[in-house]
Image (cartoon, helix red, strand yellow):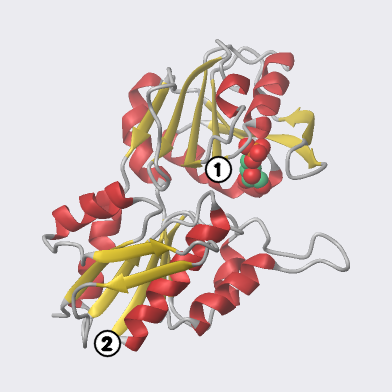
């Protein structure tokens, strides 16, 4: 049995506290300081010598700040002679930078992988990585946990047997097919073209959706543009209004809630890989991934 030391980054302290409660290991107290020039200081207030240090930190907005904090915590654990440093990054910022956008550009996900390893991370635990090939940027073990199966039991009863599971772009077709297999439905895909980080253009729906109830599945909702475009395309193709949306990561950038506040969407389900502000979100439900992460930590604890 390994002695776990759970360290909560500021990216999602509530999730870290929930995981720590389930696992029965209190979080290591950490001192944070912001210097007048904006530089970050962190200090572990408890020894982690020889322990399996588990840092829980999604790198959601502000992405760079949360990433630097994660690097600082990993470096602190390594210098404090932790036996092993595990980064639990439920939402992996820069995952959409899994390839060069064009000549002259970086591959950000590869850069982040290199930074984490340079900081001393020995293993990464993440959830529904935007692109599975990101694992190939790492030399260390990567555990990519699947969150959508946690949501399906919650929504199954509200969906008709002939539901169409819709991928809002080509990237999620495999996921949509797997979900359709589980629900016993069929699949459709929306042909989307990304114009910029903020803008995408929905071209057409491929698949039979006329008169049918639809469930859209995606890995993340950021500006909400992809989902809004998919909903509009589905309605134009004759799908039933009252569409259900499931996504693992709810970033909900400013403007997204308004964009998605259409009666055509019955409910949006996300998980808490990122903190969720529920006050302003009617027709939104959140499923916690704390038990999923806790199971991953138990595996770390018992691994030989
Ligand atoms: C794209 O490849 C992703 O899977 C999501 O569909 C996309 O990142 C969502 O972003 P937004 O909400 O800004 O359209």
Marks 1/2: CA–CA distance: 34 Å
Q: Quadrant of residue 283?
A: top left
At label 1, counting other C-alpha atoms closer than 10 Å, the crowd grade (few under 14, some 14-19, many 20 or more) is: many
Res. 83 mark: 2
Res. 258 mark: none
Of labels 1 and 2, earlier in sequence is 2
Horizontal and vertical percent position of residue 85: 34, 79
Horizontal and vertical percent position of residue 121: 42, 79
Closer to the camera in the image, 261 or 232: 261
Q: Is mark 2 within 8 Å of ligand 1?
A: no
113 sits to left or right of 197 = left
110 sits to left or right of 271 = right
**Image point 34% across, 43% down: which residue?**
150
Residue 100 position (above or below residue 256)? below
Q: Tell me the quadrant of ligand 1.
A: top right
Residue 296 position (above or below residue 224)? below
Closer to the camera in the image, 213 or 33: 33
User: In what element is the residue under mark 2?
Assistant: loop
Q: Is mark 1 within 8 Å of ligand 1?
A: yes
**Image point 42% across, 56% down: which residue?**
90
The reply to whether callout 1 and callout 2 are in contact (CB within 8 Å) is no
Quarter of the picture containing the C terminus is: bottom left
Horizontal and vertical percent position of residue 260: 58, 22
**Image point 58% across, 70% down: which residue?**
112
Res. 220 mark: 1
Q: Quadrant of residue 239?
A: top right
235 sits to left or right of 252 = right
At label 2, counting other C-alpha atoms closer than 10 Å, the crowd grade (few under 14, some 14-19, many 20 or more) is: some
User: In what element is the residue under mark 1?
Assistant: strand
Horizontal and vertical percent position of residue 274: 42, 46
In the image, which is nearer the foreground, mark 1 or mark 2?
A: 2
């Amino acid at each position: 049995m390994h002695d776990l030391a759970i360290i909560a980054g500021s990216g999602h302290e509530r999730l870290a506290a929930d995981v720590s409660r389930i696992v029965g290991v209190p979080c290591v107290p950490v001192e944070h300081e912001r210097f007048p020039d904006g530089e970050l200081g962190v200090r572990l207030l408890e020894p982690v010598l020889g322990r399996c240090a588990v840092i829980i930190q999604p790198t959601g907005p502000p992405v760079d700040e949360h990433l630097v904090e994660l690097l600082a915590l990993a470096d602190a654990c390594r210098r404090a002679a932790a036996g092993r440093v595990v980064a639990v990054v439920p939402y992996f910022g820069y995952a959409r930078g899994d390839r060069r956008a064009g000549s002259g550009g970086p591959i950000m996900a590869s850069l982040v992988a290199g930074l984490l390893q340079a900081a001393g991370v020995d293993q990464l635990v993440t959830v529904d990585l935007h692109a599975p090939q990101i694992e190939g940027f790492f030399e260390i073990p990567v555990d990519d946990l699947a969150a959508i199966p946690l949501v399906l039991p919650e929504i199954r009863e509200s969906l008709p047997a002939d539901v169409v599971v819709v991928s809002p772009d080509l990237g999620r077709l495999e996921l949509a097919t797997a979900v359709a297999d589980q629900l016993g439905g069929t699949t459709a895909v929306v042909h989307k073209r990304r114009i910029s980080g903020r803008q995408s253009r929905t071209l057409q729906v491929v698949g039979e959706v006329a008169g049918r109830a639809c469930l859209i599945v995606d890995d993340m909702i950021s500006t909400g543009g992809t989902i809004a475009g998919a909903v509009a395309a589905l309605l134009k193709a004759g799908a039933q209004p009252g569409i259900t949306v499931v996504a693992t990561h709810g970033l909900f950038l400013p403007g997204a809630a308004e964009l998605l506040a259409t009666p055509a969407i019955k409910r949006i389900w996300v998980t808490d890989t990122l903190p969720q502000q529920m006050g302003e979100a009617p027709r939104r439900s959140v499923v916690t991934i704390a038990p999923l992460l806790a199971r991953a930590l138990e595996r770390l604890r018992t691994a030989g």
